[in-house]
Image (tube, rainbow, N blue to C red):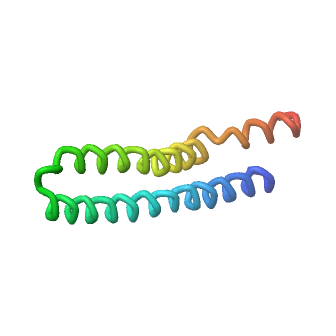
Amino acid sequence: MEQGSALILACSAIGAGLAMIAGIGPGIGQGFAAGKGAEAVGRQPGAQSDIVRTMLMGCAVAETTGIYGLFIAIMLIFANPLISRYLRIIGQ
């Protein structure tokens, strides 16, 4: 393996690891939302359906950030478009 290909694979692995850090934000946000939702239901049990519906919608929107990070990490590890482009540039 050439030095350039090895560098691209190493940088892709580091990029995939950094992309997975994107899962931290949704995890914290969803935990905070669930705690506040439980607190709100405790204060107003009659509004439970509205509170839970709003909380679940917010968690679903927040989770897309983590899913995007996972997609980028999988793409960098398995599909790696950078290697094919590099090999095309150097003529192999």
**In-front residue for pair 75/64:** 64
Asked whether, in this view, residue 49 is left or right of residue 59, the answer is left
Q: Taking 33 as reference, is 47 above or below it? A: above
Q: Which residue is most to the right?
A: 90
**In-front residue for pair 11/42:** 42
**In-front residue for pair 62/41:** 41
Residue 11, x across and y down, in percent? 69, 58
Asked whether, in this view, residue 66 is left or right of residue 81, the answer is left
Q: How many marks?
A: 0
Asked whether, in this view, residue 29 is left or right of residue 91, the answer is left
Residue 68, x across and y down, in percent? 52, 45
Q: Taking 44 as reference, is 65 above or below it? A: above
Looking at the image, which residue is at 55% across and 60% down?
Answer: 17
Looking at the image, which residue is at 25% across and 59% down?
Answer: 37
Q: Which residue is most to the left?
A: 45
Q: Taking 20 as reference, is 91 above or below it? A: above
**In-front residue for pair 87/77:** 77
Q: Quadrant of residue 79?
A: top right
- Quarter placement of the C terminus: top right
Q: Quadrant of residue 31?
A: bottom left
Asked whether, in this view, residue 7 is left or right of residue 16, the answer is right
Looking at the image, which residue is at 73% across and 36% down?
Answer: 84
Residue 26, x across and y down, in percent? 42, 57
